[in-house]
Amino acid sequence: MKITDHINNANGKTLFSFEIVPPVKGKSIQELYKNIDPLMEFKPPFIDVTTSREEYIYKEKDGLLDKKLTRTRPGTLGICASLKHKYDVDTVPHVLCGGFTKEETEYLLVDCQYLEIENVMALRGDARKEERYFTPTKGGHQYATELVKQIKDINEGNYLHDSIESSDCGDFCIGVAGYPEKHMEAPSLQSDLKRLKEKVEFGADYVVTQMFFDNQKFFEFEKAAREMGIDVPIIPGIKPIAVKRHLQLLPQVFSIDLPQDLIDAVEACKTNQEVRQVGVEWAIQQSKELKEAGVPVLHYYSMGKSDNVKAIAKELF
Ligand SMILES: Cc1cc2nc3c(=O)[nH]c(=O)nc-3n(C[C@H](O)[C@H](O)[C@H](O)COP(=O)(O)OP(=O)(O)OC[C@H]3O[C@@H](n4cnc5c(N)ncnc54)[C@H](O)[C@@H]3O)c2cc1C
């Protein structure tokens, strides 16, 4: 079922969902199941599965370092298919511009059709680790807008090299990313919102936001988006802080601010177990306020262990 249908069918009730990251290549899927199992009692209508950019690894060969480009966490679509099969839940693969040609993207979308995966998140992807700026892959897309257009074209039966007049053409529900504190490369929040509006005009059906820790930022972003005419569901993304290092890491990687009260509470912790508890309590407060405000879904970034997301879900769903 489409995410937008799940939202419509909920009749104003806030739904629970989460995002998972594929395991490192070579690790079994059982570890993933162990983390997902405890969350299924909260009946997520959908689970997102991220896609990781390829990266350079270095191997020593004959005294020299051999540079190889590889994806350390492949398997997004395979994981989507197995979760769908195992839990009877909708799964949302993240589809990236970076690292994929338009042809490869088309093949991926065709696979989604055969697997009856109806929802996809269309994302540009970050720059590769060693790059300062995002460089589009040769034969790929530069911005998520172009990817949204390609998916929308498939929905209309227009594949890259063929038009198919058939009722079997794609019928994807398309999610895109939104940034309550603006995307790190955008010159202003207003200009980033204009880009978001373009994604919606090109065919995006819903927005999932970057993590944020101050609900006010989300409410202001949502208001500005509505004033600009963005009328699709906006789903807040919530991440519970889990380790002290997040205080430096999250602002650096995601270009977001952390509220001083949260920083003080985390800094006062003596162990990472205490930090985890602070992160859970903060996320519960955030989630309660967002739920009261009527957000359609609370979407949690669950990286690795799910005990903290379970503790939050228990209070809310
Ligand atoms: C919910 C969510 C899930 C994510 N999942 C993943 C994932 O699985 N894998 C991954 O690698 N990354 C993921 N990301 C990160 C995302 O790929 C990065 O934030 C990336 O840098 C931007 O992606 P985007 O789709 O927002 O890009 P875009 O919408 O293309 O925007 C990128 C930047 O370009 C600007 N821009 C857009 N169009 C134009 C234009 N025509 N001209 C000039 N500027 C323009 C925007 O303002 C923005 O600053 C996710 C992010 C979110 C919020």
Image (tube, grey):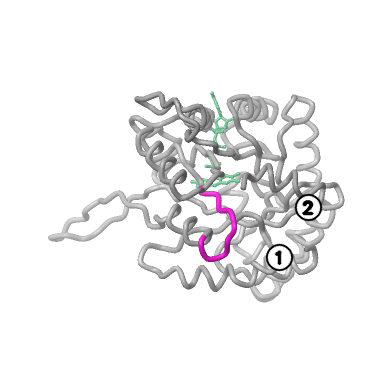
Q: Nearer the viewer, residue 207 or 53?
A: 207
Q: Secondary structure at mark 2?
A: loop
Q: Residue at x 45, y 53 (%)?
A: 76
Q: Is residue 172 above or below residue 202?
A: below
Q: Position of residue 44 (x, y in %)?
A: 67, 59
Task: Check if residue 92 falls in the magenta segment.
Answer: yes
In percent of the image, x 59 and y 29: which residue is there?
203
Where is residue 11? Give x, y as percent: 81, 47
Circle 2 crowding by C-alpha within 10 Å: few under 14, some 14–19, many from 20:
many
- Residue beneath disc 2: 14
Other residues around mark 1 within 10 Å, as few (<14) / some (14–19) / many (≥20) = some
Sequence-first disc among 1 and 2: 2
| Quadrant containing ligand 1 | top right
Q: Quadrant of residue 268?
A: bottom right
The magenta span reads: 85-93
Most extreme residue toward the right is 292
